[in-house]
Image (cartoon, rainbow, N blue to C red):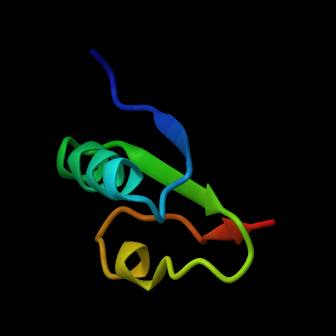
Amino acid sequence: MGKSTVLVTGAGGYIGRHVVERLVGRGHEVRATDLPGVDLSYAGELGAYRPVVQG
């Protein structure tokens, strides 16, 4: 399967965080979203990660 850009909603939650990490680990480009105020700083530390969108 080819690499693709993936949107993960709820990326600040327990499952969302693991989904983001797994997708980045497999080489996908990830965009993560969550509600305003949710800490998504972990995602910025991942290599193939696009800017976070909140709201």
Q: How many marks?
A: 0
Residue found at x 74% / y 76%: 36
In this rendering, is residue 37 above or below 52? Answer: below
> 35 left or right of 5?
right
- Direction from residue 38 to residue 23 in the image, left or right: left
7 versus 47 height, above or below? above
Tell me the quadrant of the picture where the C terminus can be found.
bottom right
**Residue 23 sits above or below residue 37 on the image:** above
- Residue at 64% over, 61% down: 34
In the orientation shown, which residue stands out farthest toward the right? 55
User: Could you say where residue 16 lies in the image, as x and y percent from the top left?
Assistant: 40, 50
Give the residue at x 55% y 57%: 32
Is residue 49 placed above or below 44 in the rendered structure? above
Name the quarter where the N terminus is drawn: top left
Q: Name the spot of residue 29 as percent of width and height, x first.
A: 43, 48
Q: Position of residue 33 (x, y in %)?
A: 63, 58
In the picture provided, is 39 more to the left or to the right than 37? left
Q: Residue at x 32, y 82 (%)?
A: 45
Asked where in the image residue 38 lies, by quadrant, the reply is: bottom right
Q: Choose between 39 and 5: the one closer to the eye.
A: 39
Which of 52 and 28 lies nearest the eye of the viewer? 52
**Camera-side residue: 1 or 44?**
44
Residue sitting farthest toward the top:
1
> x, y percentage for residue 48?
35, 62
Left or right of 51 on screen, residue 42: left
